[in-house]
Amino acid sequence: MRQTVDPFWFACGVCLTLGILAAPIASAQRLIVVASAPSEPYQRAAEGMTQLGVPVERFLLAPDQERAVMAAIRRNGRDTAIVALGAAAAETVAHAKSAPNGSPIVNCMVLDDTPATTGTVDVPLTIPAQVAATWIRRLLPQTHTVGILYDPVRSEARAADSAAAMASAGLDTVREAVPNPATLPVALQRMQDHADALFALPDPTIYTQEHARALLLFSFRHRIPLVGPTESWVKAGALFAVDWDYTDLGRYCGALALRKLAGATTTPRPARTRVTANRRTAEQLSIHWDAEQLRLIDKLYP
């Protein structure tokens, strides 16, 4: 049966409070890491796993490497744990492991709707909505109503979960369905008189490079801050975003795989999140952060 790490407890600091740190790792243990693409987040995650003190064999999922990846996975036994970075790598690893040899598998940085795979642990890529709600309260304390745009086919459940998380933080929400790109302008128009801030779900129908200009213009024209899905959106003009420290997320996924390999039941120290913000956008929206708020931000773009 597939196990999914609860995203809220995964992202919070409860384990630190309890003093649960990385368990000692036997020297015989090793990791195989398969990345779906040569993207920077995957590279950082793989680097985080090299900090765990065990041999790490890294593979990039590419047409000329797929056979080597499959062979490496199939020939390793009970001293090896496997981490797949992204959905494509998770699918390849699952196919290679059709004849299980006991190696635990952690699918790291996968979307919530990734098809279930028997006998794996999934670590989601999506930042828990509870974490985003907390940061909206910290950096936008005057906000009362948060706008959520979503594709009803892809993201209705995620939008509902986000609304529930905002409500638990004392925030109202207004949700607008965007079933296709052509309906985005109308949805924004309906939202402009009701939302104090716009929270970006990781929805591939809406938050794409093609729509970035329209969304950012809406934010500036109507003075509605956009809480972006990633740091790249902050560079482009979103007010702030909460993203993973991908090196630490890789460390978490690798440590989780090694603990499964050792039969341990404790959880590694949770992965850190990073908050990035855009100072110029804050000035244009007449948002003024005090020294305490600025200390909470990991990176501030000028």
Image (cartoon, rainbow, N blue to C red):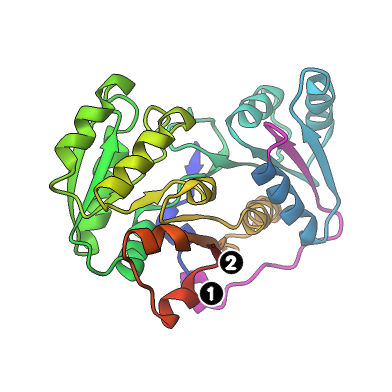
**Residue 280 shown left or right of residue 265 in the figure:** left
Check if residue 27 falls in the magenta segment. Answer: yes
Q: Residue flagged by tag 2: what amino acid is it?
A: Arg
Q: CA distance from mark 1 to mark 2?
A: 6 Å
Q: Which numbered disc covers residue 36?
A: none
Verify CB contact (< 8 Å) between mark 1 and mark 2. yes
The span picked out in magenta is 14-39
**Residue 279 shown left or right of residue 30 in the figure:** left
Element on which disc 1 rests: helix
- Residue 115, percent from left and from top: 48, 27
Camera-nearest residue between 69 and 146: 146
- Residue 204, percent from left and from top: 43, 30
Q: Which residue is mark 2?
A: 269
Q: Which numbered disc covers residue 16?
A: 1
Name the quarter where the C terminus is drawn: bottom right
Question: In which quarter of the view is residue 139 placed?
Answer: bottom left
Instruction: Give the residue drawn at x 51%, y 70%.
Output: 15
Instruction: Give the residue drawn at x 41%, y 57%.
Output: 281
Q: Main secondary structure of the magenta part?
A: loop
Camera-nearest residue between 61 and 9: 61
Element on which disc 2 rests: loop
Look at the picture and state if 1 lies above or below 229: above
Work out whether mark 1 precedes mark 2 in sequence or the reverse, and give the earlier one: 1
Look at the picture and state if 295 lies above or below 233: below
- Residue 78, percent from left and from top: 78, 43
Density class for disc 1 (Cα within 10 Å; few <14, some 14-19, many ≥20) is few
Instruction: Give the residue drawn at x 19%, y 40%.
Output: 175
- Residue 226, percent from left and from top: 35, 50
Q: Residue flagged by tag 1: what amino acid is it?
A: Leu
Camera-nearest residue between 273 and 73: 273
